[in-house]
Image: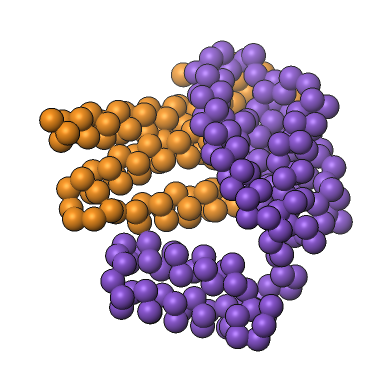
Chain colours: A orange, B purple
Amino acid sequence: MPDALIEIFISIFLLIGGAFALIGSIGLARLPDLFTRLHGPTKATTLGVGGILIASVLHFSSRAEGLSLHELLVTLFLFATAPVSAYLIACAALHLRTPAPEDHRRLDRTGGEE
Amino acid sequence: MNRWLPQPMFSLFLWLVWLLLANSLEPGHIVLGAFLALALPLFTVRFWPDQPCMGRPRTLMAYLAVFLWDIVIANLTVARLILGPVRRLRPAFITLPLDLKNDFAITVLAHSLSLTPGTVSSKVSEDRRTLLIHVLDLDDEDQLIQRIKKRYETPLKEIFPC
């Protein structure tokens, strides 16, 4: 049955998306300082959201009449805005001289990994 | 660039965004989207100090393909780094000398770097000559700079030739 096949694909993409969103959040919690934490939201979440949106495109295209592509816009806006916010946070941190990568190890031992 | 269509690519982009937002291809939406795509650039053209000029659409397509592939790889790499031992990461700042001149092209490069393997663009220097990048796990600085130059900056120079 094609319906079951599509549902399997939707589930796979949902799982991939969910897994990467989770890894991004784990990164935010585990990584020791501001600059390394910036890597979580700009990377892991792009594929996380991407996977969920592909699942959404598949689901609504198979359900409703016609192709549903406006999810592409979510991806577009996310790709356009995530680096800008990361850039601004990095700029602000550099300006305020937030503990630089030399402090990684010390910060890590004092409670980076609970 | 004529008077009534100052930014053809931008107009085309707006028209596509409108059709995607409406999520339909009804004639009404096509006409309304075309109207907005023609009208908006006329009002906003003054906010673009220097026009980004488009070189080769085919290079752009190739660039996008490489870029999307790199995003997938970047996600896997960063996922492995995040889940692995955090103490073994070698985070560092590197300075990338920029060959691109156009502000828009530099923006695209900075965006691409932020979205791909373990790099986040942190600061463009005032004179637009260098880009400060934070690397999550730096192995070899020169090798990474060469890679960025070859993989992203060279195609971008062809795409935005001004």
Residue in the picture at 51% in, 24% down: B76
Residue in the picture at 36% in, 29% down: A16
Residue in the picture at 30% in, 28% down: A12
Where is residue A20 drawn, in percent x and y? 42, 30
In the image, taking residue B56 as reference, residue B84 lies left or right, namely left
**Which of these two is toward me, A53 or B121?**
A53
Residue B19 in which image quadrant: bottom left
In the image, taking residue B122 as reference, residue B65 lies left or right, namely left
Name above or below for residue B132 compared with residue A28.
Answer: below
Where is residue B113 drawn, in percent x and y? 66, 40
Name above or below for residue B88 compared with residue A42.
Answer: above
**Which of these two is toward me, B74 or B56?**
B56
Residue A103 in which image quadrant: top right
Residue located farthest toward the bottom when viewing the structure as drawn: B3
Residue A101 visible somewhere in the drawing: no
Query: Which quarter shows the N terminus of chain A?
Result: top left
Name above or below for residue B47 compared with residue A89.
Answer: below
Residue B88 visible somewhere in the drawing: yes
Where is residue A81 drawn, in percent x and y? 54, 53
Where is residue B81 drawn, in percent x and y? 56, 20
